[in-house]
Structures are given as C-alpha cells and as structure tokens.
Amino acid sequence: MEKGKVSRRSFLKAFAAGAASVATAGVLAGCSTSSKAPAGTYKPGTYSATADGMSTVKVTMTFDAEKITDVQLDVSGETKDIGQKAADTLKQALLTKQSSEIDAVSGASVTSKAVQKAAAACIAQAKGESVIIPEEKGAQNTDPSIPAWLGAEPSIADSDCAKTIDTEVLVVGAGTGGMFAGCSAAENGAKTLVIEKNPTGGGIRDDLSAIDSRYQKEWGTKINKFDYITEMTKTAAGRIDQRLVRLWADHSAEAINWYGDRCAERGVKLWHEAGEDYKDDRYKYFPTGHTPRWADSDKGDGKKLDGNIVLGDYAKSKGVEFMYETKLEKLIKENGKVVGVYAKGADDKYIRINASKGVIVCTGGYSLNYDMLQALQPENLAIVGFNNSIPGATGDGIRACIWAGGKFDETHSMMMFDRCAIKPDAVPGLEQVKSGKFGMLWMGSQPWLKVNKDGERFFNESGTYEGILHSNQFQKDHAHYTIFDAEWETYIKKFASHGCSRMYPYENGADPNIPAAVIRDKHMPDLIKNGYLIKADTIEELAKGLGLPADKLKATIDRHNELYEKGVDEDFGKEAHRLSGIRTAPFYGAKTCGRILCTMDGIQINTDMKAIDTDGNVIEGLFVVGNDSGGYFSYTYPNLSTGAACGRTVTFGRRAGRIAAGK
C-alpha cells in the first residue's frame, strides 16, 4: 500500500456500518466544524483514502498544522451527471467546514457518502490518532491465488442483517436487462422485486436489435439468421456459444414486438432502420436496429417520455416493486442453489432478500471498474480516451457470480466506438480517461481519411468502429487523426452509414440518433472552441494545429484526393461510395481514440439464461443477463449489426424473467 493511503477495508468499515465506538466515530468524523483547529492538531502533509461509491472514490487532502489546505477528489468512475457533477460542491464543502461532516449533495447521496468516509480517514491520518476497528464483515483477501480485482467473498451472516425481505423473483439492476426481466417475471405471475444501487435506474437503451420483427416485415427487411450467426462467429474468431446467438435470432422479434406494444400504449412509434444496401460493401451490414421515436412523445408535463418511464410505469402496474440505493453484496447459496442475496441499503445496513424462484443478475458489467479493466483488458484501456458507461457498471454482479462458482469468460473485451477527440498533445489511456478532458466526435465513425502521427494513412477507414481502434495499437500514441473538409455534409449522405453513426434519415423515415444539423450547429463549434477539433484554412495550418508533419500530411491528402477522383481506392480498397475529397477549405482534423461503452465478457450461461459453474454445470436459481453474461461476444464488437448488445439484453431479459417465474 502506498505511503499515506489507507484501504477502505482496513480503515472505513466501522464508519460505513455505523458500528464504531463513540470515540472512534469522533475521530473518523474529523470532530471540529470550525474553520481552523488548534495549532498542532494535524501533522502537515498529504493523505489519501478511498471508499466505495458507485465506483471507488479517492479523496486526497493536504494539511498544515491547523487546517485542511487542499482537497482533490477522484470521482471519475461515478455517474457523469450525478456523482461527477457533485465533486466541486463536495470539495468546497470539505474546505469550508474543515470536517468530513458535510451535507450530501441532493441526488448524489451515494457519492457524497463515499467522499465523507474517505475524507474522514484522511483527517484521522493527519491527526495521527489510533482508530479502533471492530471486526469487519467484508472479507480481507489474504489468498494470493485470488486476483486483487476479485477479492475475497464478503463474510455476511443473517445476524448482520437489519431486516429480511421475501420475494419470488429478485432482479439485481434496474437498467435495460433488469426492466425487461422484471416486467416478464411479473407478467408470468411471479412476485417480483428489483433492486438498484443507483438512486434511479440506468435507463433503457435505444437501437435494439432483432430479426423478423413486425417492423422489419412491414418494410420487407429480410435477414438470414445463419448468415448473421456466421458473421458473429467470424468477428469473435469462433470464441462464442453459437447456441446463444441462434436463441437471440429465434426470439428477438418477440421481445421487440412486445416493447413496441408498450411504446404504442404511450403513443410512441417504434422505428426500424432501413438503409441502403450496397452490394460492394466489404463489411457485411445487418439492418437489425429498432428505436422508439421519443421526440414525438409527451408525458403530460411538456417533457418527453423515455424507455425507463414507459417500462417503469408498466412494471409497477404489474406489481413489480423497486428498491433503489440498494447494492448487491453477496449471493446466498444453499445446497448448491442460489436462494437470495445479501444487499446493503442506503442506510449502510445489510438486508437479506430471499428469492424463492430465482435471482436475475444484470448489473451492467464492469466498465467503470478500473482495477478490473487494468488487470483484464490493459490493451483496450490503452486505446481509449473517455468512458461513456452506464452508471454503476463496476462489476458487482460478475464478482458475486464468480464467488458463487460461476464461470467467467476466458477472453475479455469491451465495446468501443471511434468517437473520442482528445487534445493534440494528449495520449489515450487510463489517466486520459480519468482526466475527463475529451470531446465527443460523433463524426469519427464516418469513413474519412484517417492518418497516424507521421501523417500517413494506415487503414481502410470503411471498416468497423473498433477496427481502426485496435489498429491504433500499432501507431504512435495509440491514436489516429480524422481529417475532412467543408463539404462533409455532402459526403456523409453517400457514405450510407448505419446504426448510431448515421446522421440523416433512413429510407423509411426513421430518424438518426443525432442529425447532421446538430453536429454542424452544436457539436462542431463546441469541439473547435474547446480545442478538440482543429479548423484551418490550409493543410499546412491544419498540420500545425494537429502536431503532424505538414509535408507528409499534404502528400497523403493529395494521394487521397487522387483516389477519390479515380473512384478507386488502390491503396486500401475502400468502397467507391465511401471515398471523399479533401479539397475545400476550411479543413478539419481531430486526434481520435476510443470511447468505452461497456464490457462484453461475463458469466457463461446456458440457453435458459442460467449461470454455468466452473465444472460446466448449471447453478440453479441464478440467472445472468446483459453485460454480466458471457459467451456471446469476444475480442471486438460487431457494430455492423445495430444494437447487437442491447437486443441480446432485452431478448434474454424477457426470457430469464419468464423462466425464473416458472413458465
């Protein structure tokens, strides 16, 4: 352990559980609420401590002999618009009150509590006072065979619980998978409880994939499921369970049609992407995406509906109960069967929840757990610049399943999109991600000319979003540079991109995620203003702004223009309709790397969504859905099937709910 830093296990459990002695509580709270303590109260220096929020929150405090002089908070893993947004308020409160006894920021109670706990430990260190720690319930990991990111299973007993709750189906996580699972379980007659560690659910993702939905049939879209399974298998280099992909292909339409009905009940139409089909495309595209048109909705107060509202209201109408700020700590396994969980509520007290028919785990993967990412996916972490994960995706579900005997995928991967713009002097990697300094370059997935730090082209830009990101591993700075000109709106129409990268309506009238007008009028000016997109009148000026060699960049652009005019990419084979010229000023360029959306490896499951143990046998009572589940993806994400991950999640969520309910 680094000097001046205490672990949350060895120093904060008493405070977290509210079980410390009076004397101990006084030390941990920092005692004084005055602006200055008596001289000699603190040993001058800088001290750090961590505590569990949505992620691991780190507080670093600097002291002179009388007061706290500086506070730094690392809340990079917390919810962007909640916990991260509260950081400045919490920091100022600590400095003003000179104590950890500060008020929680409204709506960010989980992050606030973590900051309070970690700050209390920093103050205790600075005072040099001994702390009496009662026996802690979270087990210490003293077994060298257990990876540090996994840790030892917590030691929790019924006697530690403030209360016990009985239900039939327990769903852990109120995001996309959890909402579909909870609705399905209740529809099939089960008493259903959904717990969620965030103050609100993670929301329902748009762009949901399916084959043979009624929306596709209405338009005439036909997808051969075995062609689809073949492409999925190629993308994963064979490291998937084809039975799961076929299961999705056979049942995805039912899930999407059901969701369409729920949307229609609230006056919202579900749209299917139906784009141009270019036979010469080198990468096969599958028009699987479905998205509700929320823009036309009104929930009665002038605000728009969303999937969380629609399914949340529906779930409650079916009797589903919800408990927020309730975190899974451990699965309860009796006689080889999972029968419930130990959880911790907003009051930091343990709860036993019995689930007589099953527990469905869908906590969103581990893309906000940097210890896991560093240990399992260092090569991917090295090519990303910011994290766009759903709140709370810190691996709670996966770790709990592993402790219960579940088999974790042996290959580890994440979904990344090539839409992160960083400053020209920045470098991708964990520190860049934690800095929070990035620009959302939605245009990054378009097949523009892309060059390396030497100003040279190195990849067919018409490939998948992740393809060029993985190729960045062979380039300086693990990044590339995206180049386009003033005619960009003309080019994107003929590029005929699909999924969330598309910026103009589909042939059947379905809307893009973000229209070109928003990119032009909002995104680009903001990127330019903040230094993430360079705008220049000449190629030489553009090269200077990006830090690229002007002569090489100009030569590369000249060659690219030559190929565009020929209509043939003789160098990398990019399709003719995806070539573009760079001839009209102003010229634009951005240093580009990856954006994390989620992890894709998880606990292996069978076709009933039941977890498989390390011997290949079913763990009864334990279902795993969404990013917590494995066997479906490997190495890279097949983004040419729009919504492949979300569609898998909703299809399997409905299936898990029904089977857990006994139907």
Image (tube, rainbow, N blue to C red):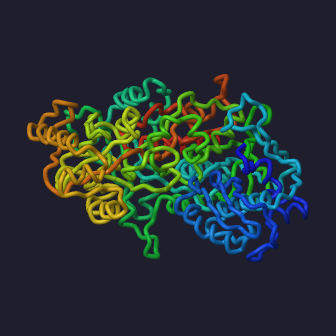
* Residue pictured at 50% horizontal, 61% vertical: 310
The picture places residue 253, in percent across and down from the top left corner, at 42, 42
* Residue pictured at 35% horizontal, 59% vertical: 531
* Quadrant the N terminus occupies: top right
Please tell me in which quadrant of the rendered image residue 147 appears. Answer: top right
Kindly tell me whether residue 317 is visible in this rendering: no
Please tell me in which quadrant of the rendered image residue 337 appears. Answer: top right
Please tell me in which quadrant of the rendered image residue 280 appears. Answer: top left
* Residue pictured at 81% horizontal, 42% vertical: 155
* Quadrant the C terminus occupies: top right
Kindly tell me whether residue 558 is visible in this rendering: yes
Q: Which is more toward the observer, 157 or 376?
A: 376
Asked if residue 242 lies left or right of residue 169, the reply is left
Q: Which is more toward the observer, 482 or 351?
A: 482
Above or below 574: residue 388: below
Residue occupying the far left of the picture? 566
Q: How many marks?
A: 0
The picture places residue 7, in percent across and down from the top left corner, at 74, 48
Q: Which is more toward the observer, 409 or 56?
A: 56
The picture places residue 603, in percent across and down from the top left corner, at 60, 34
Above or below 549: residue 296: below
Asked if residue 525 lies left or right of residue 50, the reply is left
